[in-house]
Amino acid sequence: MMEMQEDPLYREIIIENWRNPANRGVVESPDFDVERDNPFCGDRIRMTGKIKDGRLTDIAFSGQGCAVSTAAASLLTEEIKGREIKDIQNLTEQDALSLLGVQLTPNRTKCALLAYRTLKDALKQID
Amino acid sequence: MSRWKADFPIFTHNPKLVYLDSAATSQKPQAVIDAVTRFYTESNANVHRGMYDLSERATEQFEAVRACVADFIGAESPDEVIFTCGATEAINLVAGGWVKKFLKRGDIIVVSQMEHHSNLLPWQQLQDLGVELFSLPLTEDCRLDYQVADRLDMSHVKLIALTHASNVLGTVNPITDIAKYFREHGADAKLLVDAAQSAPHLLDNVRSLGADFLAFSSHKLLGPSGVGVLYARKELLEAMDPAVFGSHMVARVDQKSSTWADVPAKFEPGTRNLEGVIGLGTALEYITSIGKDALHEHEETLIKAALDAFANMPDIQLFGPKTKENRLGIFSFNIPGVHPHDVADILNRYGIAVRAGHHCAQPLMQQLGVPGTVRASLYLYNTTADIEALVEGIASVKRTLGLA
């Protein structure tokens, strides 16, 4: 790969997780299956997952999104996979944003939080 | 190389700006900004109401713009010009005041797959009344496939409501030919032209277009935002009902009922955007002084340069006609595999302002099979240097994303 230009947003962590996202796909016979739109851009994320003994044993995301929302979904799902649900419930927006490690404008913050908000919907569904 | 760019102070204040979003809104020449300020400074009063000099003067200036709009679009009389708050409201007035009154269950409104939401949603709302929508499909080259007589009961077609030019594809539709085709195949239909995109470029004449209704916005045509125009032939305006109610639009008001004022007041309740109308008048004077020929020559140069540039970037997907005939300088594109918002965000680093998303044309996006596009749109202050900047910008996007 050629050397990339320095960009305040599109750092290596975003580019890598966008091009090779972790946990992309759909979990079979999931315990939750939720979808959420970002009305600003029409992006949509679907999140599916399995829970066993209070632990998130599997999670996957699919849908169309920009590099920021895709990278955020990749990093978030990696962060929470295998963890206890009650831990995951304590995750804040700031926790989700800090996984990306970049400064975001208000509009791109919406992109970055789409996966987090979809996860919150999922947690409500399994409550 | 735009002899008009210096008239637009936005470029003095933002010297590095490469503004490629005129299809969303145009920049304003100093003359328009001055006219708005001058109205507030020298002539501000409510119109049609005051018995004093200042109000008389404001009214004169306001009504002079109505005459100026009538001249600009080739209306028979200033009474055929209704000031609205935008093209959207203009179309809604026809939906609420004409279609609701005159169309019956089973009647058909013809639209197309390239409509902006503003020329689709007002008609969708009427489906509850049993009015049906028929949508003209697109050809491979993103033009309208309108020879649909075998697919449609023409005797039920009562309104053809089409965009003159697509805000996504840049396609200029042969609306006059389309209306003629429908009428020759038995439709007794009125033609509504959504001229929001075309009016700033083609300087339409409603009579040569054969438009029964035409809508456009001031803010895309160098004028202030918050003002639009509905043109309709006078007998249509007289026959249709008002759709928004309140002061000024009445002849007589009793406690339980009212009668309407004459056209155009019937459709202009409340106080209009006075300074906006004044600014629109100046915008029309400005564009008229440039003239159709000079404007078209400049835009044709830009369109050709842009099409050549896209032809030299075969990996970029361009949506819309690939030839300069019957198209505006609106270029929707995608870098395959890259979301439009990422492209727009990175272009912004280089001072390049483009639009990204569905452009209020979601049915068209579904048709094109994409969630959105990046859109670069041109106007008289753009130059071929702006197109070169876009080409370099696209290369930078690819480098930033590690694609080149």
Image: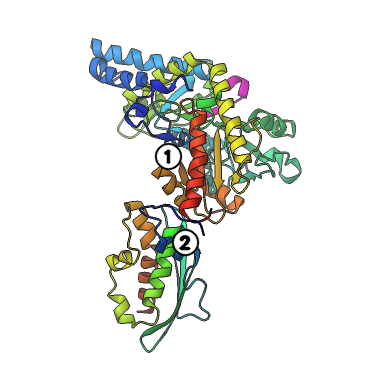
- Tell me: A82 left or right of A30: left
Q: Are marks 1 and 2 on the same chain?
A: no
CA gap, disc 1 and disc 2: 25 Å
Image-quadrant location for residue B25: top left
Residue at x-position 46% and y-position 16%: B78
Given the current orientation, which residue lies at the most extreme front position?
Answer: A3
Q: Position of residue B35 (x, y in %)?
A: 32, 18
Q: Position of residue B235 (x, y in %)?
A: 54, 22
**Magenta-span inclusion, residue B210:** yes
Image-quadrant location for residue B249: top left
* Label number found at residue A44: 2
Is there any visible trace of residue B51 in the rendered image?
Answer: no
Residue at x-position 76% and y-position 43%: B150
Q: Position of residue B381 (x, y in %)?
A: 46, 26
Disc 1, SS: strand
Q: Residues within 10 Å of mark 2 (few under 14, many from 20)?
A: many
Given the current orientation, which residue lies at the most extreme bottom position?
Answer: A53
Residue at x-position 49% and y-position 21%: B80
Chain label for disc 1: B
Residue at x-position 66% and y-position 45%: B137
User: Which residue is nearer to you in this view: B384 or B116?
Assistant: B384
Disc 2, SS: strand
User: Which residue is nearer to you in this view: A64 or B298?
Assistant: B298
**Magenta-span inclusion, residue B344:** no
Q: What residue did someone put label 1 on?
A: B353
**Magenta residues?**
B206-214
